[in-house]
Image (cartoon, rainbow, N blue to C red):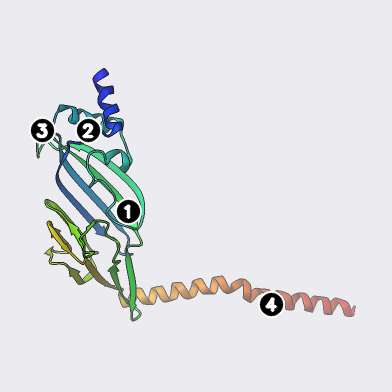
Amino acid sequence: MKNQLLVYFLLIAGMLSGYSDYSYSMGMKINEDGSAHVTEKTIFLFENSIERKAFEINMNLGESTILEWRKFSDKIQYHMKGKISDVRITAKREFDVSFDAGAVIVDYNVDSIFSQTKVGSRRTIYSLLPDALAFDRTKTGQTSIGNNAELYFEYPLDAELINAAPVYESDGRKIMWRGPIAGNWEFSFAREIALSSEVSLFFIETYGRAVNSLPLILLPLFALLVLFVLVKFGRK
């Protein structure tokens, strides 16, 4: 018990800093509206039994903030800049890697990371905002991901890839980058709604406008009715 308390206080004080990063990955599954679900996984190695115990204490306490887990690795943070919600943090041992390995997985939803450009009435192009990625930057301002790092984007099923950079690998609808790599990140795709969907959307919007305008239409009619009643009974 005393040993656990000692480890915990050392952890709080930030005195346990011997952890070494093993790997990092970030996957982003993009929704049809341009929002996305992001999963970031950081695996690191313990240098000794005290560090391993510190990780297990944090894990058993159910810590659920980025700040608490950043004691183990600087890579544990949000690497997407946008409106973040529904954050879930999971910690576990990574015995497949090593007995002295642990992992922290951060899941969250993010919005406002794509610009949207309408091309005609049915086609929309989604482009990743230039400052959406929160990775390290080179002296020239390029985005950089390091060794043993992997980044992938998965775009919607009905989308068409328009552009991606720097040099990437592809697997179906999944675009992947493996570190070390640096460059100006670009990613855009297009979605086109079917003609039948466009017609349905037109009638839905028309109906909505009609419903919203109904009070404005009824008000003059009600005023005329009141005026008619007043004039008719006024004559009597």
Which disc is residue 221 wearing? 4
Q: Are marks 3 and 2 in contact (CB under 8 Å)?
A: no
How far apart in space, not on screen, are marks 1 and 4 (Cα)? 49 Å
Q: Which of 2 and 157 is in front in this view?
A: 2
Instruction: Identify the residue at image location x=26%, y=18%.
Output: 2
Residue 140 visible in the picture? yes
**What residue is disc 1 on?**
109
Residue 199 percent across, percent down from the top left: 38, 77
Q: What residue type is labelled 2?
A: Leu
Q: For the C terminus, which image quadrant? A: bottom right
Asked whether, in this view, residue 220 is left or right of residue 31, the answer is right
How far apart in space, not on screen, are marks 2 and 1 (Cα)? 31 Å
**What residue is disc 2 on?**
16
Q: Which amino acid does label 4 sit on?
A: Leu
Q: Farthest residue in the front direction?
A: 139
Provide the secondary structure element on which disc 4 rests: helix
**What residue is disc 3 on?**
99
